[in-house]
């Protein structure tokens, strides 16, 4: 599998970009998974549903499966920040690409998503794992870079850049152990 991260400040366009890259990669015949870092408590099931009831009863994990979908809900008994490599290990190994949104401090190769109005400093000058910058304002980048600068508003071109550079993004779990 190939793994690439997308890092940037809230409001920079990470979610929109990942949402557009999924079908762009699928049109190339690739199977795509997404790992998303959430900064707060969230739910994927709702009161009254069986999975919610099992979880509310105290189950550590609830796995629901049908002929069309599988979902695993795990309750952390103590607050625990998930590690991206642990999450990647839980994915199906038949996937072609995994797009990782968030985990900006991880040691995954990543594309920094940047807009001038996003609050916070850029990562690329100090983060060796940033391999490209996706922006809609290349002329406004605060520091010059030799990294590729990709058009944030052209997900087809960014998908093609990923495919053309796929060798850089081959995920070898042992390298991160």
Image: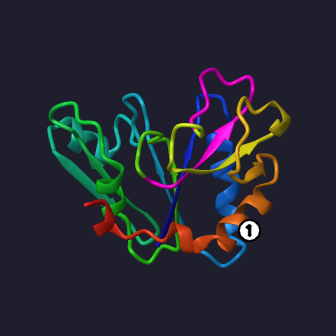
Residue 108 horizontal/vertical position (percent)? 45, 54
> Which residue is the site of mark 1?
160
**Can residue 104 be seen in the rendering of this structure?**
yes
Residue 125 horizontal/vertical position (percent)? 59, 37
In the shown orientation, is residue 2 left or right of residue 60? right
Identify which residue is drawn at 59% across, 40% down: 124
Residue 122 horizontal/vertical position (percent)? 61, 31
Coloring basis for residues: rainbow
Identify which residue is drawn at 21% across, 44% down: 54
Q: Is residue 121 magenta?
A: yes
On screen, residue 123 above or below 59: above
- How many residues crowd mark 1 within 10 Å: few (<14), some (14–19), many (20+)? some
**What's the magenta bit mostly, secondary-structure-wise?**
loop
Identify which residue is drawn at 52% across, 67% down: 169
Q: Which residue is situated farthest in the right direction here?
A: 139
**Nearest the eye: 117 or 29:** 117
Q: Is residue 17 magenta?
A: no
On screen, residue 142 above or below 107: above
User: Which quadrant of the rendered structure holds the C terminus?
Assistant: bottom left
Count of number-bearing discs: 1
**Can residue 90 be seen in the rendering of this structure?**
no
**Nearest the eye: 126 or 8:** 126
Identify which residue is drawn at 67% across, 33% down: 12
Residue 115 horizontal/vertical position (percent)? 73, 32
Q: Secondary structure at mark 1?
A: helix
First to last magenta residue range: 108-123
In the shown orientation, is residue 58 left or right of residue 3? left
């Amino acid at each position: 599998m190939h793994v690439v991260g997308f890092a940037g400040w809230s409001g920079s366009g990470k979610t929109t970009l990942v949402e557009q890259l999924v079908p762009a990669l699928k049109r190339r015949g690739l199977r795509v998974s997404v790992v998303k870092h959430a900064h707060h408590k969230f739910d994927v099931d709702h009161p009254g549903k069986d999975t919610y009831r099992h979880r509310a009863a105290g189950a550590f994990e609830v796995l629901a499966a049908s002929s069309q979908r599988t979902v695993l809900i795990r309750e952390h008994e103590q607050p625990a920040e998930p590690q991206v490599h642990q999450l990647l290990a839980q994915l199906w190994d038949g996937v072609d690409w995994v797009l990782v949104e968030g985990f900006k401090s991880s040691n995954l190769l990543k594309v920094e998503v940047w807009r001038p109005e996003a609050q916070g400093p850029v990562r690329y000058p100090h983060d060796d794992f940033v391999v490209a910058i996706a922006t809609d304002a290349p002329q406004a980048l605060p520091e010059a870079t030799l990294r590729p600068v990709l058009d944030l508003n052209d997900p087809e071109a960014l998908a093609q850049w990923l495919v053309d550079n796929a060798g850089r993004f081959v995920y070898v779990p042992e390298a991160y152990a």
